Amino acid sequence: MKRALLKDGYITYDQTLALAEECFNNKRIKEITANRIQYLFVDEFQDTNNKIYGVIEDLRKQKKTIIYCVGDPEQYIQSFDSSIRNFDNLPILKASRSSQYLTTFNKSNRRSAEPIVNFLNHFSQRQYGSETFEQQRINSMIGENVKFINKPSDITSMLPSFFEICERHNIPHIERGIIAKKNDVVNKAIAALKGNVLSPDRSINVSPINEIRDTLLSVLDTNQSQYCETHNETSFDLRVKCIQIIRSIRKGEINNENTFVKFVTETLNLEVKNRIPFKIDNLRMSIEAQRSTNAIMVSNIHRFKGLEVDAVLAVAKTEKELNLWLETDTSVRDAHNDKATSDYPRLGYVAFSRARKILCIACLETITLNTKAKLVKLGVEII
């Protein structure tokens, strides 16, 4: 695939990093680049790998660019690549230990209610030299103690308790989220809600007609002006076709990528040239979100990162997964590098920190007394 893309003049994201690294072996290119960039802002610095960090370092050493990096190492959930291998090698931590970087701490938490902030501090108190990082809630916010909904096996049985708490705080459905690590758990939540869910993707913020239009034009490998010129149609004609697709999705006639292609080729009589850029389920969620007032955000943790809602139900698939989420010892969290679960100690933190007012945790497996004791020690109320 990479060779085919390269032949057509395209490069993948990974190739851009390799090319940047190769270019910066040339002293003159580094000088030219530094002369062009007066300021460099790096967001989500914890997700930076060593190739990107190498480029940042090369720019820094030219002493012409003011560089500002922002990140939270506890939110690194990308899995370790061959250049990092263990948590201590993350660029954000290496930079924090370097005398060439001035490390400052933003301890203000303006998102979550105080009980949630207190809970998060069990997982984020990392030592930086002589200073310990600890979040502080800015301004008061109504909230409850973190809850563990002790109703395993079935997400359907967990929902009444979660919804009751949300109703008590007048939290609308659109401000409720159910998140999990495993996609099969996400699918169980979607089934429990009978598909009445929202996707965290950009589609929920975009008109469904525009979303369908962009998808259709993408699979036709064209843009709107070229399409109208080629087919002797107006933008209104294209909009009519998009509405046809929306109606077909609502009827269930289009329910996967194959039936989408079949509809475009046979019903609309258009030639498909590209694959669909994302799953039909995302389009369906975008469409249904416009009609339903009680749809709830459901997602895996990776896709939910960066978002926030008033109330979160974080569901672990197994007790082992839950205990990795609840690990408070920084050294144990950092040392955990099993290939399949290396990010689990931080995935819990990312999930927990999405909540503004209400945080509920649950597990599909029945938990032992030891795990219950751990939850109680963390100030979690078991219900």
Image (cartoon, helix red, strand yellow):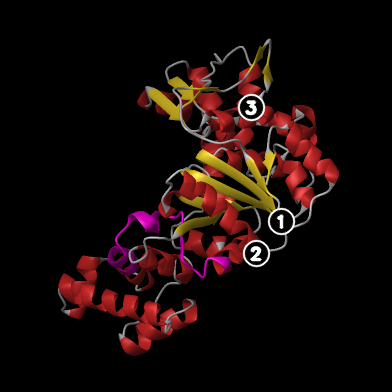
Left or right placement of residue 17 versus residue 324 in this view: left
Residue 231 seen anywhere in this rendered image of the structure: yes
Where in the figure is residue 368, as x and y percent of width and height? 84, 48
The structure residue drawn at horizontal position 48% and vertical position 18%, both measured from the top left corner, is 62
User: Badges 1 and 2: C-beta atoms under 8 Å apart?
Assistant: yes
Q: Quadrant of the N terminus?
A: bottom right
Q: Which mark is residue 184?
A: 2
Q: Which residue corresponds to mark 1?
A: 317
The structure residue drawn at horizontal position 80% and vertical position 32%, both measured from the top left corner, is 332
Mark 1 Cα shell of 10 Å, populated few (<14), some (14-19), many (≥20): many
How far apart are the alpha carbons under marks 1 and 2?
Answer: 9 Å
Residue span colored magenta = 192-212
Q: Which mark is residue 121?
A: 3
Tell me if residue 148 comes above or below residue 25 in the rendering: below
Counting residues from the start of the chain, the first of labels 1 and 3 encountered is 3
User: Would residue 209 be counted in the magenta stretch?
Assistant: yes
Tell me if residue 313 comes above or below residue 203 in the rendering: above
Res 224 → quadrant: bottom left
Counting residues from the start of the chain, the first of labels 1 and 2 encountered is 2
User: Would residue 37 be counted in the magenta stretch?
Assistant: no
User: Badges 1 and 3: C-beta atoms under 8 Å apart?
Assistant: no
Q: Nearer the viewer, residue 259 or 255?
A: 255
Residue kind at label 3, given as amino acid type: Asn
